[in-house]
């Protein structure tokens, strides 16, 4: 498998996973978005960095 074979599958899975919470609990999802909107940029960046590092770690474990 090449990168270009796997990329569309990975993007599709991101959409599926991202859609689970709004589908199951739209009220809590809306509250979470409102809370995130009030956070400082620094906290959001740190969360994003942590998410990326965790994702890289999982990719390392899988491969």
Image (cartoon, grey):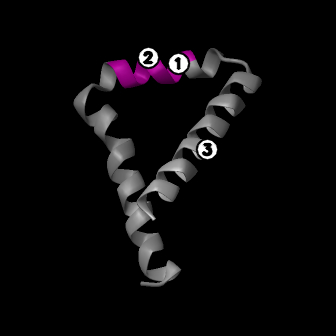
Identify which residue, 11 or 30, lies in the foreground.
11
Residue for badge 3: 53
Residue 31: assigned label: 2
Q: Residues within 10 Å of mark 3 (few under 14, many from 20)?
A: few
Circles 3 and 1: CB atoms closer than 8 Å: no
Q: Is residue 63 above or below residue 22?
A: below
Residue for badge 1: 34
Q: CA distance from mark 2 to mark 3?
A: 26 Å
The quarter holding residue 10 reads bottom left
Q: Position of residue 54 (x, y in %)?
A: 54, 42
Q: Is residue 51 above or below residue 46?
A: below
In terms of secondary structure, where does tag 3 sit? helix
Which quadrant, please, contains the N terminus?
bottom left
Magenta region = 28-35
Q: Position of residue 2 (x, y in %)?
A: 48, 84
Identify which residue, 16 or 49, lies in the foreground.
49
Q: Is residue 30 magenta?
A: yes
Which quadrant, please, contains the C terminus?
bottom left
User: Is 54 displayed left or right of 45 in the figure?
Assistant: left
N-terminal label among 2 and 3: 2
Q: Position of residue 44 (x, y in %)?
A: 66, 28
User: Is 32 displayed left or right of 23 in the figure?
Assistant: right
Please tell me whether the stretch drawn in magenta is mainly helix, strand or loop.
Answer: helix
Q: Residue at x 62, y 30 (%)?
A: 47
Q: Residue at x 57, y 52 (%)?
A: 56
Q: CA distance from mark 2 to mark 1?
A: 5 Å
Circles 2 and 1: CB atoms closer than 8 Å: yes
In terms of secondary structure, where does tag 2 sit? helix
N-terminal label among 3 and 1: 1
Q: Residue at x 23, y 31 (%)?
A: 24
Circles 2 and 3: CB atoms closer than 8 Å: no
């Amino acid at each position: 498998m090449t990168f270009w074979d796997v990329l569309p599958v990975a993007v599709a899975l991101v959409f599926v996973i991202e859609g689970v919470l709004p589908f199951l609990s739209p009220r809590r999802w809306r509250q979470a978005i409102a809370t995130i909107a009030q956070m400082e940029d620094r906290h959001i960046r740190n969360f994003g960095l942590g998410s990326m590092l965790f994702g890289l770690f999982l990719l390392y474990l899988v491969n």
